[in-house]
Image (tube, helix red, strand yellow):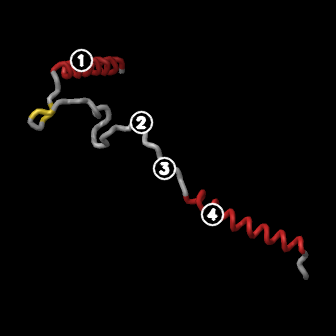
Amino acid sequence: MQATRREIMATLASTVAAIAAQPLWAQTRFASPRPMASPNAPANQNVPAGLDGANIPVVNGQNVVPPATWMDIREGNGEAAGNGAGFQAAG
């Protein structure tokens, strides 16, 4: 069967379009966006949550917690214990 001029031009046009589109297709297939760092992520991944940037002073290689901070911790523990005791009495 003899190819007509229209079929030859269509084949040539589709071949040229496929060759021209391949670099664009290959880039979009393999390129992926870089993940963005979270603005809430801690600066140091080895520090427990909430203690990053707590500015706890270090004296002779040991952390020194101010007495006012210890009082806040003790009060919080007392409140938590009181809440727990209420649940035990109800159960």
Q: Position of residue 47 (x, y in %)?
A: 27, 39
Which amino acid does the dot numbered 3 rest on?
Arg
Q: Which quadrant of the figure has residue 15?
A: bottom right
> Secondary structure beneath disc 2?
loop
Q: What residue lies at 19% left-to-right and 22% top-to-bottom?
A: 70
Look at the numbered disc 3 and give the secondary structure of its residue: loop
Q: CA distance from mark 2 to mark 3?
A: 15 Å
- Whether tag 4 and tag 2 are in contact, CB under 8 A, the answer is no
Q: Position of residue 26 (x, y in %)?
A: 60, 62
Query: What residue is at 59 percent from the left and 59 percent from the top?
Result: 27
Give the vertical position of 73 relative to 61 (above or below). above
Task: Please state which of residues 55 and 6 is positioned toward the viewer in this rendering.
Answer: 6
Residue 31: percent from the left, percent from the top? 55, 56
Q: Earlier in the sequence, mark 2 or mark 3?
A: 3
Q: Earlier in the sequence, mark 2 or mark 1?
A: 2
Residue marked by disc 2? 39
Q: Which residue is mark 1?
A: 75
Name the front one of labels 3 and 4.
4
On residue 23, the disc is: 4
The residue pinned by badge 3 equals 34
Residues at marks 4 and 2, CA–CA distance in whole angstroms: 35 Å
Q: Circle 1 sits in a helix, a strand or a loop, which is it?
A: helix
Label 4, residues with CA under 10 Å away: few <14, some 14-19, many ≥20: few
Q: Amino acid at mark 4?
A: Pro
Closer mark to the observer between disc 3 and disc 1: 3
Per the model, the C-alpha gap separating discs 2 and 1 is 32 Å
Tell me whether circle 3 and circle 1 mark residues in contact (CB < 8 Å).
no
Left or right: where 41 falls relative to 28: left
Q: Nearer the viewer, mark 2 or mark 1?
A: 2
Closer to viewer: mark 4 or mark 2: 4
**5 on left or right of 71:** right
